[in-house]
Image (cartoon, grey):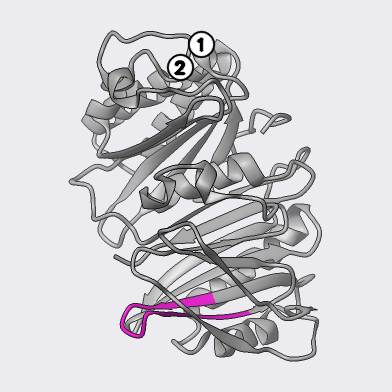
Amino acid sequence: MSGETVAVVPEGLLDEGVWFRVEAAGTASAVRRTAERLAADLAMPERRIAELSIVAAEAAGNLVKHAQQGVMLVRTIRTPEQAGVELIAIDSGPGMADVQHAIGDGHSTAGTLGIGLGAILRQASRWDLYSLPGKGTVLTVQVWPLAAPPQGWAAGLTRPMSGETVCGDAFASREVDGRHQLLVSDGLGHGGLAAAASHEAVRVFRQTPAGSPSAVVEALHRSIGHTRGAALAVAELDPVARVVRYAGLGNITGTVFSPDGSRRGMVSMPGIAGHQRRQIRQFDYPLPDGAIVLMHSDGVVDRWKPAEYPGLLTRSPELIAATVLRDAGTRRDDAGVLVARLT
């Protein structure tokens, strides 16, 4: 993930979050201040803001001291009842051979996230950590004002290409009338106009009545014609029928990964939502118990091999998404990843 720039924090942080390349103490301080400001904007209690400050300072400080190509994402997380702050620390450093030992207070090595990890985890409402020697470490930490809600069934990340401050990729998930649906959108081109196309797709997706993925894609196609258009796909996870229903236009990749590591690619049709399409078709795919559905834009290359990441498929959706973004995301394009699992 080299080439990341320190983000300029906008007034009123977007839920997509702000990325930082964390290589110097000054950047670590900026991460802490951004997390505090975001928590204050969300009206979190002062006690939780103070604890979040500890988490942000320790996580960013560890990247400065021990990581290689360390980056952090600071963003809002929401449920209907409350809003919190999530920090995702990603590096390509030496990794840790014994994660449980590293969690203990006082542990210090030349590896990543050695010092202060115990303090981070004590303040967190929810956390997940994955590390492999030679590949690096991914840490996800959530700080909620009240008790942590149940683990979400879907999570994703987006990251702008080098030189851009906004990302043309976007994602969304929703549950409507028992339907568990996902959207990934890749606005045509880059920058503000691409972001506007994807944000409009997300808005329409959230407001469109429940329907099949093909019907939702058709509604999106009709509704975003005033934008520059987007490649997009909608997936629906059916926990009763144990199938994934999938429809897409353009270059969005969707894959079902079984717990044994086998994979099944899903088909999108040629076209640009909002501008040109020949047809919209829906396909059904088996959804084995414990499987994950992973969708991504063409800013993520389809080279991720679960066999190289023992146990990763059992982890939280946000941690899986962050790991895939680190190892398969490109810097010459916007990148977006969305992961879902029904329990």
Give, as a three-letter code, the residue at label 1.
Answer: Lys
Quickly name the residue at label 1.
Answer: 65
Quadrant position of residue 187: bottom right
User: Percent from the top left, x then y, of residue 85?
Assistant: 38, 41
Q: Quadrant of the N terminus?
A: top right
- On screen, residue 200 above or below 225: above
Quickly name the residue at label 2.
Answer: 62
Marks 2 & 1, CB-CB < 8 Å contact: yes
In front here: 56 or 292?
292
Quadrant position of residue 336: bottom right
Magenta span: helix, strand or loop, mainly? strand
Please state if 253 lies on the left or on the right of 215 as rendered. right
User: Percent from the top left, x then y, of residue 201?
Assistant: 62, 72
Is residue 100 magenta-colored? no
Quadrant position of residue 270: bottom right
- Residue at 74% x, 55% y: name it: 192
- Badge 2 crowding class, 10 Å Cα cut-off, few under 14, some 14 to 19, many 20 or more, is many
In front here: 271 or 191?
271
User: Percent from the top left, x then y, of residue 118?
Assistant: 27, 21
- Residue at 57% x, 90% y: name it: 215
User: Disc 2 versus disc 1: distance between alpha carbons?
Assistant: 5 Å
Please state if 276 lies on the left or on the right of 167 as rendered. right
Range of residues picked out in magenta: 235-247
Label 2, secondary structure: give it. helix
Q: How many marks?
A: 2
Give, as a three-letter code, the residue at label 2.
Answer: Asn
- Residue at 65% x, 89% y: name it: 281
